[in-house]
Amino acid sequence: MKPRIILAQTTLADGSSLELHEHDGRKYLHAHGQQWAGTGNVIAEEELAKLGTHPFRPARQPRVWVMGLGLGALADAVVRALPQKKAEFTIYEPLRELTQWQKSFFSEREYLRDSRVRWKSQLSPSDLAREEGGLHAILLQADACPMENGKLLIDDKRWLGAMRDSLQQGGVLGITASRIISGMYQRLRRAGFDVVEHFVESHPSAKKPRRYPIWLARKQAQERGPMAR
């Protein structure tokens, strides 16, 4: 039996431990007695990047934010999905250690060397709302979503409102998770989005593949028109 190796660890604001593990060549995060950001999550994050950026492939200067880094699979997939030289990607991650672990243990990631990527370690709802309709998409993996006062940003009406206000008309808020989040569809609808729910299978060839949800929430447009500028 191959051993589990703890590559790095840090203490979270609530006093619990966040660890980066490696087992049988696979790396994943471990916190509160649970594994996340594993292989299945990567498949869902890559699908989210594909679906969430697809409407904006014709855009000359697409602007996409990734809320929460995790192990970087979503950020890497987003950067690869939009090759435009004038594209702009912003990653909001308040936990400095996650950024450091990326550079130390995932140096092959393309987004770490991409000059189009910008980083933010501090952000408030009012900061995000100041984008005033300038963003094409905001994408996040719920387990990696930053928290404020012990609450996920997507569980907070202020943050959902700021995400809506920061998106252009027809812009997309895309969310994936390792599990179905009860009430997410209705929550996004109440926040002013048109919502479609998808599922992606982690291993389609498995007898009982695990299904990961993806919510694509489109900002309701006042005037219907092309999604890309």
Image (spheres, rainbow, N blue to C red):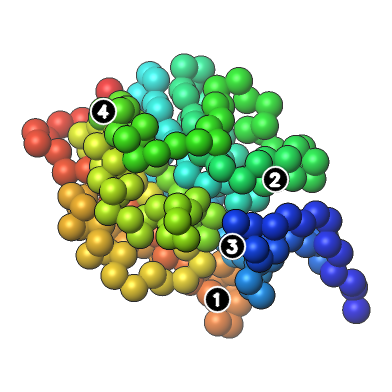
Q: Residue at x 90, y 73 (%)?
A: 2
**CA–CA distance between discs 4 and 1?**
41 Å
Residue 182 or residue 207, whichever sits in front: 182
Q: Which residue is pictured at 49% across the width and 29% down the height?
A: 89
Q: What amino acid is at disc 4?
A: Glu
Q: Residue at the spot x=40%, y=28% of the render? A: 63
Q: Which residue in the protein does label 1 denote?
A: 209
Q: Which residue is mark 2?
A: 97
Residue that mark 3 sits on: 14
Q: CA distance from mark 2 to mark 3?
A: 16 Å
| Circle 4 SS class | loop
What is the crowding at mark 2: few (fewer than 14 residues within 10 Å), some, or many (at least 20)? Answer: some
Crowd class of label 3 (few under 14; some 14 to 19; many from 20; radius 10 Å) = few
| Quadrant of image for the C terminus | top left
Image quadrant in which you'd find residue 190: bottom left
Q: Which residue is mark 4?
A: 132
Look at label 1 and name its amino acid: Pro
Tag nearer the camera, 2 or 3 = 3
For numbered disc 3, what is the local secondary structure?
Answer: loop
Residue 215 place in picture, x, y as percent: 35, 58
Circle 2 — which element? helix
